[in-house]
Image (cartoon, helix red, strand yellow):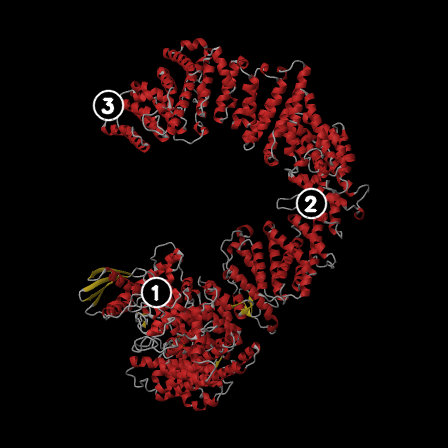
Amino acid sequence: MGRAKGEAARTKSRPSSSSTAASLLPSGVTAVGFGGYVGSSPVNSSLASTPDAVPFTDIDGEVAQHLKRLSRKDPITKLKALTSLSQLIRQKEAKEIVTIIPQWAFEYKKLLMDYNREVRRATHETMTNLVSAVGRDLAPHLKPLIGPWWFSQFDSVSEVSQAAKRSFQAAFPAQERRVDALMLYSSEIFTYIEDNLKLTPQSLSDKATASDELEEMHQQVLSSSLLALAALLDVFLYSHSEKPGPENVTGELKHAVKARTIAVSSAEKLCSSHKYFQDFLKSQSPAIRSAAYSVVKSCIKNIPNAISEGDMKMLAGTILGSFQEKSPACHSSMWETVLLFSRTFPDSWTTVNVQKTVISRLWNFLKNGCFGSQKVSYPALVLFLEVVPSKSITGDKFFLDFFPSLWEGRHMSFSSNTDRHAFFLAVEECFIWAVRNASRYCVGAEAIYLFQHTLVDEVLLRFLWPEYLLAASSKNQDSAFSSSTLDQSKNGIQSNHKEPRESLNSKHSMDYEESLGKCIVKILSGIQRLDNNLFLVFSSKFQADILDIFHQTEYSSQNVQWVVKFILLLDKHAVRNGEIWPLLDLIGPTLQKSFPVIGTLDSPDAVTVIVTAVSVFGPRQITQQIMCIGLGAEEFLKSFIETIIPWSLKKFSPSTAARLDLLLALLDDECFSKQWDAVIRYLVLQEKVSFDPGTMDRNYISVLAILMEKVKERTKKSVHQSDQCEDWHHELLDLVAVYVVQAFPQFGDSDARFICAVLGGGTIDDKISFISRKTVTLIFEEVLRRLMTFMKDSTFAWVQDVCSLLFSGKKYSDWRLEPSNNLLEMAHFVLDILNGSLFCLNIIEAESELVQGILAAIFIIDWEFSCINVSEDKLNKEHIGETGSRLAFCEAVHAFRCKIRDQFLRGFGVNNRKSLGTTLVQSIKCITFVDNRFESDNFVSLCGQWTLDVFEIFCQDQVEEQQLLEQFLINNDLWPLWVIPDGTGARLRTDNVSLSLHVPNNTKFIALVDKLISEIGFDRVVAGLTSEASPSSTKDSLTDLGINKTHYSRPWLAAEILCTWKWLGGCVLDSFLPSFVSYMKNGDCGFSDSILNVLIDGALVHGSCSGLNLLKRASVDELEAVDEPFLRALLSVLSTFFQDNLWGNEKATSLFKLLVDKLYIGDNANLNCLKILPSIMNILVRPLSIGVEDQTNDLPDPYSESKLHNVTVDWLKRTVCFPSLSTWQSGEDMEDWLQLVISCFPVEVTEIMQEIKPARYVFPAERAVLYELFQKQRQGASAVLNKLPLVQKLLSELMVISVAYCWEDFDEDDWKFVLHRLRFWIEAAVVMMEEVVENVNNTLTNGSNDVNASLNEFESAVVISDPFPIELARNALVGFSLFCSLIGSQDKEHTGNLNHLGSEKWEIITDRIFEGILRLFFCTAASEAIANSCCHEASSIIASSRLGHRQFWESVASCVLQSSSHARDKAMKSIEIWGLSKGAISSLYALVFSCKPLPPLQYAAFVLLSTEPGAQLAFTCDTGKVSNDGTLNNEDSIETSSAENVHLREELSYKLEKLPPMVLEMDLVAHERVNLLVAWCLLLEHMTSLPSSSPARERIIQYVQESTSSVILDCLFQHIPLELYMGSSSRKKDAELPAAVSEAARRAIATSSVSYSVQFLWPVGPEKMASLAGAVFGLMLHHLPAYVRGWFSDIRDRSGSSAIEAFTKAWCSPTLISNELSQIKKSSFADENFSVSVSKSANEVVATYTKDETGMDLVIHLPPSYPLRAVDVDCTRSLGITEVKRRKWLMSLMSFVRNQNGALAEAIRIWKSNFDKEFEGVEECPICYSVIHTVNHSMPRLACKTCKHKFHSACLYKWFSTSHKSTCPLCQSPF
């Protein structure tokens, strides 16, 4: 009834009998009562139909409505009505509720029969609310309610029965009140139950109910009614019968007597009418059968006298034969009924055929495991045996059938521990009961014993015992016991039930074995107490089985484990209970007979049997049983020494360990010391009087090792370990230990085992040692000696040197370390000792040198292992052979060191830990300076990892770390080279005369320090910062709390690293400076000042020129060219700190003042300071000038007294005093002063040389003196050409700064001088570069066929022997750029200047200069193009040669971008005339796709290729001539493809048409991928330059569609981060996407150019590639919308396409839509027949076309993600147009706008032209039904000679291709 199927589920929560119901009564109340009952009740159909319905006139309307709803069939409606009714009842007064009780009672009885359990539960909850509300007013209405109410408490659903119980208890809170209510209305309850038992499924309901529901409802009614009846009889009758007689009668009320009378009469009536419920006992429903058993049991218990003899006979067959019941739900009540019936009517057994009715059914019941009711049925078996009449069965036959049947059902109990426990308990109880009650079935003692012996023999020995042997034996089941045992088991009971081997094996779990063994022990205990002779039967069998196994030597070692297990079971279940029979009658006699046999066997398992027995019964007791002696100490000790010791300590064999276990087990507390002394002396001395190592039997070392290991394990289990160690100590153990560790060769593996066993210390808690401390020290000294010998034998020089370093000056330094052929064996021996006794070192921690030496040796050998692995590829074969033999041991040491890292070293003593850490870091330092064979970065990384490990292991806090760093960085003869620490400061090293010898090793150590900085930080390694309160500082040293945070500051180390500049695997720029800057951002000015002072002092001492270009501020990368270490380091720090704004004007001013003060020594200049000052001023002048630019000349000059102004003027005046450069000779200091002046007037070059301007503001006085200097040098310039190159360089630099700062003072002669000089220097560079190109070209044309030889020739061809022309040209280019910028700005800003610079005045000379610059540009481009035609490596050589003159080529590129198209055209023509292997365009392509890009050059090449005049030659070459109307002249030919009319240059087409293989798998910044995107940029730029409607543009578009791969778009979106759009809304904020990507896409669409993204592409990086990809995608959307849309529609990845659409919609579509609508609005294609209107808000275009009396309106709607989604076209109005034509025109417009690769306005224009042509009578193409082709916009011109219809050539070509024939589509005649 709405519950889970299955009878178990239906009866789970209800009482199965009246006794169970009574047990549910609350504690503390009398037996009369029932308050704990649960269940549900059906309604009586008669009650449901006979009473008249109560009128609703007096009931509240809302309540009445809910009551009516209770009659509905739908359970949901009923539930809602009950819920509402409960709420109303809680809200209303009691007097209002009383009026609804009659109607509620009527509905209540019906609701109890509802099929839905929730309805029944809700009914009782409503009843609870009702009775709580009305209280006593319920009494008048109780009569019709009490029967259903009681019945409902036995509902099979627990929730329903509990709800019924709660409602009844709410009405009658007191127990007595509930009983009184039942008694008062007992007649009504019995009547209700009687009526229910008469119901049929058909009479339950008057509504159309499903038959299965009716049947289930009927079963529910019957089972609940029967349970209610049984419980009611128990309440009325059984509890009354248990009370005392007289008091019971006198104290009772009349209604109680009446109720019992009614109960008896009603029960007799029901029993009679239902034939004692026989039909219910045979019901198909388990619930009904179970309830029927409960009712029958209640009748037997309460009214036995009412059962006649005839009734008894009728019941006997049914009850005694009930073992055929298979439902576990019925077995509880069934057993109670059977047992009660047998006790009450014992004679009933004589009325049935016992064998047929009872016994056979019982056997089947047992064989089937009680059909699943093990927990109920097995405990009832012994009770059943008690009630079975002895006369009704034959004893021996009954039990010999009973136990096999019971045993056969055991397999049903394997899955549950509870069931298995119940089974074996039943076996035990039944067996003991049968043995104990044998007299019931036998007469006479002999018969009784024979019966008992039969049971033991047939059940225990043939049945239980073989099963235990099988369960407890080893996995080899086939050989588990002897053949006799197997034969017995085969002939025994087990044959009655055959099981597969898999089943047997699966059930033999530990729990099964334990339960079976316990059962056997309990049985043995029981029969031993009953009759010892019976026990001896089993004892004999037990002894025979053991002896049989021991005699089978082949199997004895495998199959005695069951004996051990059984002895342990005896201990657990018998010995511990004080029983002595296991020793005296079973184990003792067995061991006495077995000991001689065990002595002859070499079986550990056999000995284990005795050991187990000793552990259970005690050493003396077992010895007494085995040796047949008394329990006295003397007899026991004598037997132990004379018999046990020789037997246990004989030669080493497989059973030695077990015999030693027995030996230790037999040690007695009273005799321990004598026993242990006897054992040791027997092993060590044998028959000798004193210890003689030379005569000791080595086999006994193995025995002794195992013995001491077992002693250690035994001691660990002791509570007082230290006392136990003292007990086990023996002086002979010390002697043996020293002898073993010093002996050579060793005894074998047992040597180390013995030493470890006696030393102890295997774990941190292992403090067990059996030898003296002196002996421990001697052992570890020998360990250290052998480790040192191993290290001295290393093939690595650093290992030997470190070994010498470690032990120099110590007491072990005088040891003689002689090499041995068995060195590795010795090493492994001592490592085994350390592995097993590491923590024993704590015992000798006072021997600090010894402990530290051992641990240091372990670390060094571990490092050697790392070196061998790192250096295998760098060592020669001989060296590898030498190290290979050591590798295994070193690897073992490495594993050992890893193990002890956390276990041991962290717990090391403080002093020893610090000392060992110092030793190890100094060893690492020594390694870097000794062995020069290791120059790899891997080796340095390895040393760094070693150092970090040492810091981590040996430093408890940051203070200790700093102290260890101090030891690591301490100076020595080799370190440092430049600066050495001096107290808290530093001083320069003056003895570094042999730098070349020490630099390699020094740089290796610097590389190591750099690794440390990168791992643990600049602040800890260099700045030396520590936390103010370290975790352990309060623990180790109170003085550490006061340590200054910068106490360990190391400015000298920073200066040393900066001076070193480069080291193995790194340099200052890559790692150290970034770390320094990062530290400085957190603020530590004092530290940086200390470093600066050191560097300045060093630079002044070593005074040297920098050699830098002082015209502009040198980048940090360019500082690498400075040779002098201190100056280079100083400049790098200054440049970095000022560039990153770490220092500002204030710092620059203080430095400036410091240097100026050092410039003069008295009246003379400090030459060293003068040499370094220009390069420093080049950096300082900008921060010094901050704020000066804001001043104007109109105001008083507040800076006239400024230090920079005054000093600069002073320097200028001093320089003016020098003679002209024409008279300068080398060696004079004029160069230094001029360099100083030039450094004070730098020029500023913006990114990629776009603009050059003065870098600072100068005062008029400075400008005047500077111009004076320029004038002086100009006047003497006629002789400069014959002077030194350095003079020309100085003059060029002076001219540049003069143009930059004094150009307003120049006259025409000045400008002529400047321009002619600039041209002269540039032309000189041109001549040199043209010579280089000639050499490269000659190498290609006349070179060798050998590639390597050609590469060498290319390298020679590009070598520039004299760099001065390049440097002069570089300065000239800077000056010319300044001049060009002045010409451009002078007209706007200086119109009033008398020296007006008119561009026409200097046009001729500027063009000549530009031509020269362009020739330089094309020279390098042509060189790379020519070399590239040879091979990629040759091209790389050319490209690499430019990197050495980066500034020069950047200046060239900047000037190229400023050149005019006229100059470019002349330069390109001159290249073509030159006659090189490659022309101008090929040269530009080679440069733009260069393998080693120089960004300005590549961008300049890109600009020249994409603009005129180069663009005309850089792209297409048409095969046909183009007419004015845009169509091909050869119109009669069929166009195979429009793309064939376009031929791109090979350099471009190769990249566009043939994408690199696996392009999508390439790295995102791969060179080929970059070139692919640049090629597309060139094509898109060219397409942009073409008119929108030009035929050339259309052919380019057609080429893109047919010849290029759309994979390029997939490439683009590998760069654009689409993850932000995955699974989210389409609109994203700009902050969520990299701004460069979205901005590039918008800029490309708005400007129709990707030039901006290309300009900043190099050097290539992921972000720049993403920006370029965004720009290319935006421009492709703009110019190739249909092409992109076709690619987008083919995407199958839904998430990917959604993300692409979201990106386009957010960043591209808005601009594109706005542009399209604006172009349409501005278009001029409207006329009197055609008009267009635009709605920007709706993104719609309405095109209206009218002609004569026809017309139509077409609406074009642009989707939000246009152009990825096609535009929608709809016809909103048509006039005078047929539906066919309307649809054709609509499709025509849709085709035009969707296929247009260009502006939408152009598509509309073409569509309008198509309309016009059609109205003009031009015949449309019969294939596409359009006059103008929708793609190439051509007219139908190819006519069929037969039908005369004209076709588009493209349509006809497609028709021929798809139909595979060349016939006319209309007339099918040959075309």
Return the disc, 1 or 2, that comes first in the chain's sequence.
2
Q: Is residue 14 left or right of residue 905?
A: left
Most distant residue in the right direction: 688
**For the residues carrying marks 3 and 1, which lies nearer the camera in this image?**
1
Q: In the structure shown, which secondary structural element does the residue marked by tag 3 occupy?
A: loop
Of 1761 and 743, which appears nearest the observer?
Answer: 1761
Q: Quadrant where the C terminus lies? A: bottom left
Of 1436 and 1269, which appears nearest the observer?
Answer: 1436
Q: Quadrant of residue 1156?
A: bottom left
Query: Residue 990 placed where, x, y %?
Result: 58, 73
Please state which amino acid type lies under the numbered disc 2.
Ala
- Dot 3, crowdedness within 10 Å: few (<14), some or many (≥20)? few
Q: Circle 3 is placed at which residue position? A: 55
Query: Residue 1607 placed where, x, y %?
Result: 42, 64
**For the residues carrying marks 1 and 2, which lies nearer the camera in this image?**
1
Q: Circle 2 is placed at which residue position? A: 757
Give how far apart the Cα atoms at labels 2 and 3 are: 100 Å
Asked if one can make out residue 510 in the rendered structure from this viewpoint, the answer is: yes
Q: Circle 1 is placed at which residue position? A: 1682
